[in-house]
Image (cartoon, rainbow, N blue to C red):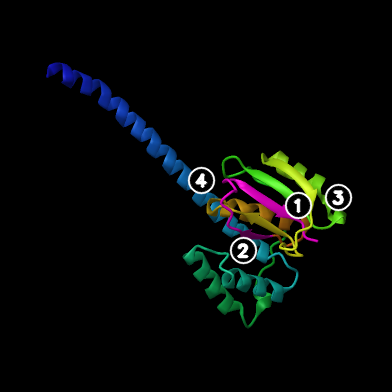
Amino acid sequence: MQKNNQILILVIPGVLALVGTLLGGMLQGYWNSELSRQKYQSDLVLKALESNSAEERLQTLKLLVHTNLIKESSVRDSIVNYIIQKQKDPSSIPQIKPATSVSLDAPIVDNARVYLLAGNKKLTNKFNDIEQQLTNAGFKVMGARNIFDVGRPDSTEVRYFNADDQLQANKVSEFLHFKYGQSYVAKYYKDNKAKSGYIEIWLGR
């Protein structure tokens, strides 16, 4: 009996330490994800205020609310109240000048992989620069090619295939929009064959 107690005394601290490490890692991952989500929403609002046109700034704020791009209810409610206040006088909405340089943040998902695709050979000249931006940020670019696919839209988009990759796809689409001045919509397509971390950048036709 005494020997068993001695074993327990030796084992329990180790188990508690292991549990503490696991919980600490989980909490750290959660807070990192929350911070990334908050930064993404903040960047969207700031981007909405960049236009030289006060009316465009107002309409873009409305778009963020109506398309549910702002997920945080408290932030969304604040934007709605702000829109109501500025509705009659959009000129009072301040303009935020965009930053002079734009860079892509490091991946926030494990094994982040990207494939570049275009439906027009003329667009393939953009591959090298986009690939360089992705590679510098830490993404693995699996390939780049021109394809014929009637199921894809004429416009640009960022496709993701796992729900866990939504935030990553949003951040990539945001960067592409800021960097190249085109709207890259992040869209979910269900594909059980696609493993987590994989997204596609479609340059349109």
Could you tell which of marks 2 and 1 lies nearer the N-terminus?
2
State the CA–CA distance, disc 2 to disc 3: 31 Å
Residue 45 - label: 2
* Residue ID for mark 4: 32
Amino acid type, callout 3: Asn
Q: x, y (%) of residue 30? A: 46, 47
Which three-letter amino acid code belongs to the residue tagged 1?
Leu
* Label 1 residue SS: strand
Q: In the picture shown, does residue 141 fall above or below 185?
A: above
Q: In the rendered structure, which disc, 4 or 1, sits on the residue that comes first in sequence? A: 4
| C-alpha span from label 2 to label 4 | 20 Å
Element on which disc 3 rests: helix
- Disc 1 or disc 3, which is closer to the eye? 1
Q: Position of residue 120 (x, y in %)?
A: 84, 57
> Which residue type carries mark 4?
Asn
The mark tally for this picture is 4
User: Where residue 10 sits: x, y (%)?
Assistant: 25, 20
Residue visible at 46% across and 41% down?
A: 28
Look at mark 3 in the image and give the residue it sits on: 125
Upstream in the sequence, badge 2 or badge 3? Answer: 2
Determine if residue 101 is in view: no
**C-beta proximity under 8 Å, tags 4 and 3:** no
- Chain part drawn in magenta: 185-205
Quarter of the image containing the N terminus? top left
